[in-house]
Image: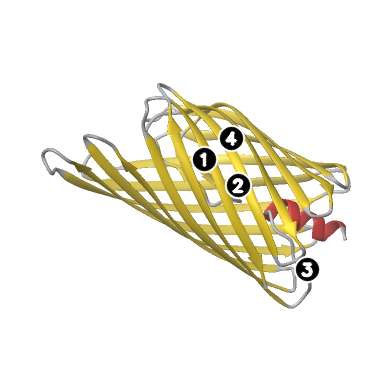
């Protein structure tokens, strides 16, 4: 039972039976910038699990920003394989991230193409869970090519069978050569069956960060300085869930509030 709870916490979903299971979810996110700009993000996720040990996830997302002088569209397609064999787990992901920028007045257009690889591993010890992750991102486009590397550690522990905490220091070698350091605290809480709460705080500096659990990628040019988020999964029986959330994030010169809503279905 404890192993299944671990998978539920790490993956953000639960497997209700052995053999073959399918989870499908869709999300919408709206970003409100303190510069009066906004963004819209649509994403779709599917996860196929076999015997609660092998998980294949596919996702696609599209983010649009349509401002007075310009518009930008970025898509992201991710495939991820997660393997679990007590006390070890392994994950490998690949993302293709194309983007298109258009100036409305001049019609000037440029394209950018990103490729991201992520690998991670965890081991469950009697009192805690220890893991490491590595991300490698490259991008080519009309301006300049860039490469970003990130190393992350996972130090996690059950404070109670309903309460799980994770501390994640991250070191990033940015495309400009700068070394960035940040730390994330994540807390997951199961107050009662059917409701799953998630909290997260990040402080420090990071750039081009890939979240290997949410399959999201922060691709802004500016360094991220602080984030705080809260989200919930409320289950209607064992087949459906609704997932509202809120994310506040600060960059070097602007701030964004993200309002998120999602629906999940399990088969």
The residue that label 2 is drawn on is 133
Mark 4 and mark 1 in contact (Cβ < 8 Å)? yes
- The residues tagged by marks 1 and 4 sit, at their Cα atoms, a distance apart of 7 Å
What element does badge 4 sit on? strand
Q: Residue at x 69, y 51 (%)?
A: 233
Mark 4 and mark 2 in contact (Cβ < 8 Å)? no
In the rendered image, the residue lying farthest to the top is 253
Mark nearer the viewer, 1 or 3: 3
- The residues tagged by marks 1 and 2 sit, at their Cα atoms, a distance apart of 8 Å
Asked whether, in this view, residue 131 is left or right of residue 211, the answer is: right
Q: Residue at x 58, y 35 (%)?
A: 170
Residue 185 at what x, y percent from top left? 68, 33
Locate the C terminus and report the quarter of the image it occupies.
Answer: bottom right
The residue closer to the viewer here, 173 or 164, is: 164
Of callouts 2 and 3, the N-terminal one: 3
- The residues tagged by marks 3 and 4 sit, at their Cα atoms, a distance apart of 33 Å
Of callouts 3 and 4, the N-terminal one: 3
Local crowd size for mark 4, using a 10 Å CA cut-off: few (<14), some (14–19), many (≥20): many
The residue that label 1 is drawn on is 150
The residue that label 3 is drawn on is 16
Residue 126 at what x, y percent from top left? 88, 48
Of callouts 1 and 3, the N-terminal one: 3
Look at the image and name its color scheme: secondary structure
The residue closer to the viewer here, 75 or 40, is: 40
Residue 67 in sight? yes
Mark nearer the viewer, 3 or 4: 3
Of callouts 1 and 4, the N-terminal one: 1
- The residues tagged by marks 1 and 3 sit, at their Cα atoms, a distance apart of 34 Å
In the rendered image, the residue lying farthest to the left is 106
Of callouts 2 and 4, the N-terminal one: 2
């Amino acid at each position: 039972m404890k192993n299944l709870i671990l998978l539920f916490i790490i993956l953000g979903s639960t497997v209700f039976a052995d053999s073959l299971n399918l989870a499908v979810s869709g999300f919408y996110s709206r970003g409100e910038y303190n510069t009066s700009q906004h963004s819209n993000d649509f994403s779709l996720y599917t996860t196929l699990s076999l015997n609660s040990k092998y998980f294949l996830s596919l996702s696609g997302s599209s983010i649009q920003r349509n401002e007075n002088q310009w518009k930008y569209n970025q898509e992201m397609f991710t495939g991820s394989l997660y393997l679990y064999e007590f006390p070890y787990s392994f994950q490998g992901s690949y993302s293709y991230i194309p983007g298109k920028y258009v100036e409305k007045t001049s019609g000037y257009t440029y394209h950018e193409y990103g490729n991201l690889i992520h690998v991670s591993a965890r081991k469950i010890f009697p009192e805690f869970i220890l893991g490491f992750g590595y991300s490698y991102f490259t991008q080519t486009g009309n301006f300049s090519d860039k490469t970003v590397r990130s190393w992350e550690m996972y130090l996690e522990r059950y404070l109670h069978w309903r309460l799980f905490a994770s501390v994640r220091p991250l070191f990033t070698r940015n495309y400009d050569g700068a070394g960035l350091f940040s730390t994330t605290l994540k807390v997951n809480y199961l107050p009662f069956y059917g409701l799953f709460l998630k909290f997260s705080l990040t402080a420090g500096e990071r750039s081009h960060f890939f979240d290997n659990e949410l399959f999201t990628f922060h691709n802004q040019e500016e360094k991220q300085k602080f984030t705080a988020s809260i989200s919930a999964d409320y289950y209607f029986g064992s087949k459906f869930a609704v997932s509202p959330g809120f994310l506040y994030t600060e960059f070097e010169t602007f701030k964004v509030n993200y309002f998120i809503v999602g629906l999940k279905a399990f088969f």
